[in-house]
């Protein structure tokens, strides 16, 4: 098999090229794209490479889905609607606290849904509609499954359980968000039966709410009645115990009157306490009166009668004092003229003495009165002190007894409050139970469906397609996991570790001649890019290169021929040597007749190089094909003569290209690798496994060869994950056809 040229496109934007490697000081012209979490090219490549697998799996899945849909028994679904009132009805003010808190609405609705799904609700529907005795739900052949030895009652109970299980399995309950309506859907093979069961569920659900409400109210009233009676009895006992204790201890509590009666009830004053408070107040007042009396007595005890405050403030006594003063004035006047024995003087002296005696008696009476008041005040204080002492002892004794009485009173008061709360709650529940409209209401009754709910062709096809896509994706990824062939341009550098010199697109056999003759074709543009990469990678002093590959048929010979022609067209004197001593193909590719003498004869010295080369194929291009195939190619390539031949060619030509054998299984290419200046590794895309290519490169390196880069041939952009435009329009440059 001969090598054929392949098609490929240049490096994608943003990817490093040979120019980056040999111009380190230059910043890349195109900014590197940000890394993506999902490699679109990788996904696209997998889908294209596994397109037949994916298409087959999808076709099988859709076919199976269609067959299953056609074989399914038609099922009808009827739906009834029930509205929920979780907040209750505010029929009475007393019922405003009845309802569900707003933050528990979702839990309340979920609980209602579970109530509908319960077997207990299904049992109520079965009994109401007598479904266990009908054949439209359990089937006409249900009696044939009766186990031997079952009595009629046991068999009826068994069919009832079967009907309950059938109903629970046919329910489709939907409670939409932001809605207080529950849709009760029932699926059955009979459309009429589905509607009947859906309505039966709605009616049973609403009836269960009413029944539950009535039972709850009845239970609450019974419970509250019992609690009221018990509390009333306990209150009576507590009040009797309090009164009996007060009677035995002779504790008389005076009632508290006023707006704070309730608050001060526990601090009510007893009779002894009230007496003690009164005596204490009287004692304080008596002591104050006694002190005042003492101070008054001390103030008037040594004063003359005329200086007493009572005398000075008394009008009658003041008139006596004024009369005394007048008579003393008359007496003084008469003594100036008469002697003391003068009758008038004697008379005035007698009157003055009488007035003084009268004033003295009045002063003494006032002092005696003040002294008596002091004595009385002292006596009252002493009496009150004795009484206060007696009452204090009695109050201290009563204080301990009052503590226990307060405990009994507080217990009785707590029972009074509890009884009041129970009575209020009883009245509230009793009033609400009489007008409770219920929290559930049937909104819409189910109607008989006219079209089956299942099978749904569109839904089944969607499920089958989704399953097929998942299965196809899994199988495709599994196949890709075990497939390590080199497909994309990135694989050359990432997996092989070689500089990427370029790639050639895939071209069909019938288009090779046409693309090769058109220098603007995608194929020739690709080879031009490869030539430029090699020209920049090799200095002019390194002018001997080898073209090799891992295996035959990868396009190395075609690549060697085209590159030789391109280098020659740029004015470089080029020699193309067919060094494949086992399966030469250069002469055939150039469509020239295979000569009698060639490389082997030149190496062995039978002919001169100038006599063996073929000229005229292209200007500046000489061809040295293979004449006779030698029996031992390895010995010729390993000989000293072949090394001398390489040195001779190096001096005569600007560039020498050797098209050698594949690396795998042969020693020719590794032996040549140590003689040439550089080796170019050619590999075919989508064919060569990564492990084989890496082994071939290792063999070249182990032999001492210098591999300057790799060329990827027969590149299919679609299989590598590139877009359609990338494959067919990237190299379209020049005149359009």
Image (cartoon, rainbow, N blue to C red):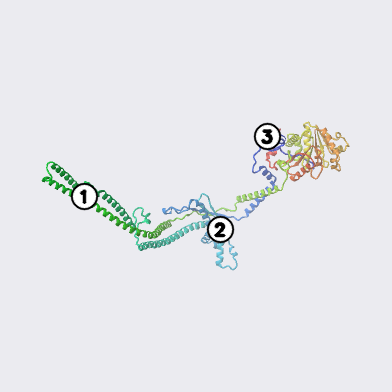
Of labels 2 and 1, earlier in sequence is: 2
Displayed quadrant of residue 698:
top right
> Considering the numbered disc 1 on the image, is that residue within a helix, a strand or a loop?
helix
Residue 635: in sight, yes or no? yes
Q: Which residue is mark 1?
A: 363
Mark 2, other Cα within 10 Å: few <14 / some 14–19 / many ≥20: some
Residue 596: in sight, yes or no? no
Vertical order, 153 against 185 (above or below):
below
Mark 3, other Cα within 10 Å: few <14 / some 14–19 / many ≥20: few
Q: Which residue is mark 3?
A: 27
**Quadrant of the snapshot with the C terminus:** top right
Q: Which residue is mark 2?
A: 168
| Separation (CA) of disc 2 from disc 3 | 72 Å
Of labels 3 and 1, earlier in sequence is: 3
Whole-percent x and y of residue 232?
40, 61
| Separation (CA) of disc 2 from disc 1 | 120 Å
> Considering the numbered disc 3 on the image, is that residue within a helix, a strand or a loop?
loop
The nearer-to-camera label among 2 and 1 is 1
Vertical order, 609 against 245 (above or below):
above
| Separation (CA) of disc 3 from disc 1 | 136 Å
Residue at x 57%, y 53% (from the top left corner)? 453
Of residues 227 and 555, the one nearer the viewer is 227
Vertical order, 153 against 474 (above or below):
below
Q: Are marks 2 and 3 in contact (CB under 8 Å)?
A: no
Of residues 351 and 131, the one nearer the viewer is 351
Whole-percent x and y of residue 379?
28, 56
Mark 1, other Cα within 10 Å: few <14 / some 14–19 / many ≥20: many
The answer to whether 96 appears left or right of 7 in the picture is left
The answer to whether 235 appears left or right of 128 in the picture is left
Vertical order, 376 against 5 (above or below):
below
């Amino acid at each position: 098999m001969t090598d054929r040229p392949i098609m490929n496109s240049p490096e994608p934007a943003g990817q490093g090229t040979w120019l980056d490697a040999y111009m380190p000081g230059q910043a890349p012209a195109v900014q590197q794209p940000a890394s993506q979490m999902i490699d679109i090219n990788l996904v696209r490549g997998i889908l294209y490479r596994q397109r037949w697998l994916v298409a087959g799996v999808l076709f099988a899945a859709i076919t199976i889905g269609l067959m299953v849909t056609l074989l399914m028994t038609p099922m009808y679904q009827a739906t009834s609607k029930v509205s929920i009132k979780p907040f209750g009805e505010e029929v009475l003010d007393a019922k405003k606290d009845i309802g569900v808190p707003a933050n528990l609405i979702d839990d309340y609705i979920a609980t209602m849904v579970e109530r509908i799904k319960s077997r207990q609700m299904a049992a109520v529907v079965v009994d109401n509609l007598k479904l266990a005795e009908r054949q439209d739900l359990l089937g006409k052949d249900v009696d044939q499954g009766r186990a031997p030895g079952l009595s009629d009652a046991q068999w009826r109970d068994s069919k009832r359980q079967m009907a309950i299980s059938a109903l629970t399995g046919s329910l489709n309950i939907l409670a939409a968000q932001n809605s207080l309506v529950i849709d009760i859907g029932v699926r059955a093979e009979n459309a009429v039966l589905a509607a009947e069961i859906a309505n039966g569920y709605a009616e049973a659900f609403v009836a269960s709410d009413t029944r539950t409400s009535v039972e709850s109210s009845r239970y609450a009233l019974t419970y509250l009645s019992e609690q009221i009676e018990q509390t009333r009895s306990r209150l009576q006992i507590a009040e009797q115990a309090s009164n009996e204790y007060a009677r035995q201890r002779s504790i008389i509590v005076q009632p508290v009157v006023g707006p704070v009666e309730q608050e001060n009830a526990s601090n009510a004053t007893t009779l002894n306490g009230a007496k003690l408070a009164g005596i204490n107040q009287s004692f304080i007042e008596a002591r104050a009166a006694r002190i005042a009396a003492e101070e008054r007595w001390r103030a008037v005890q040594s004063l003359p009668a005329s200086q007493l405050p009572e005398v000075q403030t008394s009008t009658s006594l003041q008139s006596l004092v004024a009369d005394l003063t007048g008579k003393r004035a008359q007496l003084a006047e008469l003594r100036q003229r008469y002697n003391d024995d003068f009758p008038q003087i004697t008379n005035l002296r007698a009157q003055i003495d009488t007035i003084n005696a009268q004033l003295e008696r009045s002063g003494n009476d006032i002092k005696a009165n003040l002294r008596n008041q002091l004595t009385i005040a002292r006596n009252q204080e002493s009496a009150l002190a004795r009484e206060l002492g007696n009452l204090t002892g009695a109050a201290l004794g009563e204080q301990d007894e009052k503590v226990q009485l307060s405990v009994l009173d507080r217990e009785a008061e707590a029972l009074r409050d509890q009884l009041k709360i129970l009575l209020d709650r009883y009245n509230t529940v009793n009033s609400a139970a009489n007008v409770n409209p219920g929290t559930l209401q049937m909104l819409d009754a189910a109607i008989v469906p006219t079209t089956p709910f299942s099978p749904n062709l569109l839904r089944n096809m969607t499920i089958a397609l989704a399953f097929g896509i998942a299965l196809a994706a899994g199988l495709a990824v599994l196949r890709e996991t075990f497939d390590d062939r080199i497909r994309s341009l990135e694989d050359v550098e990432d997996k092989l570790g070689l500089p990427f010199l370029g790639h050639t697109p895939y071209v069909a056999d019938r288009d090779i001649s046409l693309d090769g003759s058109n220098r603007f074709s995608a194929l020739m543009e690709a080879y031009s890019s490869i030539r430029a990469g090699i020209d920049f990678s090799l200095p002019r002093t390194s002018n001997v290169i080898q073209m090799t590959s891992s295996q035959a048929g990868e396009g190395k010979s075609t690549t060697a021929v085209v590159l030789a022609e391109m280098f020659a067209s740029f004015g470089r004197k080029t020699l193309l040597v067919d060094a494949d001593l086992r399966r030469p193909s250069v002469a055939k590719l150039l469509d020239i007749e295979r000569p009698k003498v060639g490389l082997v004869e030149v190496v062995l010295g039978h002919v001169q190089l100038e006599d063996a080369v073929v000229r005229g194929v292209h200007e500046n291009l000489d061809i040295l094909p293979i004449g006779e195939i030698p029996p031992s190619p390895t010995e010729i390539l390993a000989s000293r003569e072949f090394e001398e031949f390489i040195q001779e060619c190096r001096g005569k030509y600007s560039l020498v290209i050797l098209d050698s054998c594949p690396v795998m299984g042969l020693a020719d290419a590794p032996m040549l690798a140590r003689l040439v200046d550089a080796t170019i590794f050619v590999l075919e895309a989508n064919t060569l496994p990564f492990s084989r290519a890496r082994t071939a490169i290792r063999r070249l390196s182990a032999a001492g060869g210098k591999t300057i880069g790799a060329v990827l041939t027969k590149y299919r952009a679609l299989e590598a994950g590139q877009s359609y435009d990338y494959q067919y329009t990237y190299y379209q440059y020049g005149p359009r056809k």
